[in-house]
Image (tube, helix red, strand yellow):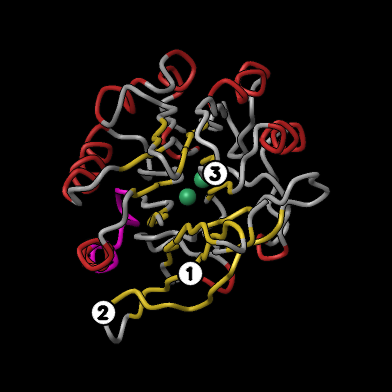
Amino acid sequence: MRRLLHLSDIHFGPPHYEPAAVGVESLVRELRPDLVVVSGDLTQRARARQFRQARRFLEGLGLPFLAVPGNHDVPMYRVWERLLDRYGAYRRHFSADLEPAFADDEMEVVGFNTAFNLTIDNGRFTGRQLAGVGERFSSDLSGAVRIAVAHHPLAALPELMGWRTARRSAEALAVFAAAGVDLVLSGHVHVAAVGRAPDCPRRMWLVHSGTSTSRRGRGAEQGRNSCNRITLEAGPEGRTARVEQLVWSEDRGRFEVDTVHECELA
Ligand SMILES: [Fe+2]
Ligand SMILES: [Fe+2]
């Protein structure tokens, strides 16, 4: 059995919401997950200080973590930097690795950077990334759950309010399926969602977290914070991922279970 805590859109900077961040710290102490995943938008404006705050926060949890960039982690208004050194601040102040990976004998988690944006916020996969997916999921651990992490949505799940998917998402879903991916963890829309990847030859689940620690929740999640507790289990009846969507309760000052999805894996 493995446990992950999936955070997203933690947005250090003005919209960051400290009470929810303290709530995440308590949750981590309580759950002791094997890995904390952050599916992008670590900062609001890709500033050095915001990256350092995000790094301090994640390192302070005291557990292995894996994070990928989101569109907010590329400078939007510092035009030259955006054109010439898009990931400079990320690399210098958060991590040199834009596409980290984590593996043990029960799970293989691989990060993909979809934040190639120059002027707009929707992301994309590159041909090079798509060609390399099979190689990146390279372990020969039979039965290990394979998890891809990418900031932008790969399919228009109903909860995502019609937000655009990353460019080349359909191709990405196809190569993920061919590589045996079971779960794709994403964010960006600031809304929680869980659903089967559509038109997919393999049973693959798309799991979104809302914004875990910012005031930027959208739609029905305006002013709300969420994250996902994911439990991976292998039993005689097959492999499953239980995704518990946790929502921040302002009154009780803690994250609480809102909705539970039992995802059967292939
Ligand atoms: Fe965001
Ligand atoms: Fe985003």
Q: Residue furthest front?
A: 236
The label on residue 143 is: 3
The residue sitting at 39% across, 54% down in the picture is 2
> Taking 228 as reference, is 48 left or right?
left
- Vertical position of residue 52 compared to residue 136: above or below: below
Residue 15 drawn in magenta: yes
Where residue 133 sits: x, y (%)?
61, 25
Mark 3 secondary-structure assignment = loop
| Position of the N terminus by quadrant | bottom left
Mark 1 secondary-structure assignment = strand
Q: CA distance from mark 1 to mark 2?
A: 16 Å
Dividing the picture into quadrants, the one containing residue 56 is top left
Q: Residue furthest right?
A: 199
**What residue did someone put label 2 on?**
253
The residue sitting at 53% across, 49% down in the picture is 185
The residue sitting at 59% across, 69% down in the picture is 262
